[in-house]
Image (tube, grey):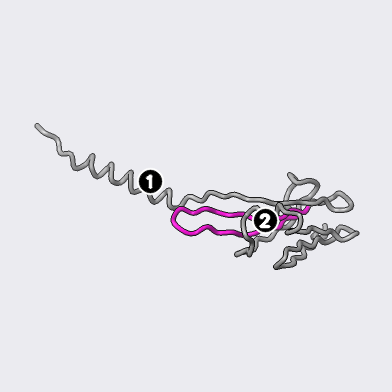
Amino acid sequence: MMRSKVPWFLFIVTVLLSAWFGLRMLTLPSSGGAGAPSPDGRYYAEASSLKNYELSRERRIYAKFVIRKGSSSGPVVTSIQVLPERVPSEWSFREDEFLKIEWSKDSTQVVFTTPNEKLILHVPTD
């Protein structure tokens, strides 16, 4: 008795289609950034420009601005994500002449300045 090859063929087609759709949804991020501690050392501000490669669509560049408690690995106090960011590449925020991070003397706010934008983040009161 000969078995039908149709179930195996359908199984293989289903696996291949699932893999193809899964890879199309995959995003591969790359980024660059810089950071600076607050004058009193209680907070750390960082800015990152990121790019997601999406196999099904064009690349997407965006910026993320974060204030952390303590150090660069501390918990996030506040953050904002800006879409789309007008930067030439995701590595732009690593260039000193492109991004400036300036804290107020009393460490209550930080100003992120790029050639196109200026963003002020306030440290939430405890």
Describe residue 26's horizontal placement relative to residue 74 as left or right. Answer: left
Q: Residue at 82% of width from left, 61% of height from top?
A: 109
| Rendered image: mark on residue 19 | 1
**Start-end of magenta stretch:** 45-67
- Report whether 30 appears left or right of 4: right
Residue at (55, 59) in percent of width and height: 60
Residue placed under numbered mark 2 in the picture:
92
Circle 1: is it few (<14), some (14-19), or many (20+) Cα within 10 Å?
A: few
Residue drawn 58% across and 54% down?
Answer: 51
Q: Quadrant of the C terminus?
A: bottom right
* Residue type, mark 2 in image: Ser
State which quarter of the image contains the N terminus: top left
Q: Position of residue 50 (x, y in %)?
A: 62, 54
> Badge 2: few (under 14), some or many (20 or more) residues near its Cα, within 10 Å?
many
Quarter holding residue 97:
bottom right
As drawn, the residue found furthest toward the left would be 1
User: Which SS type dominates the magenta stretch?
Assistant: strand
First in residue order: circle 2 vs circle 1? 1
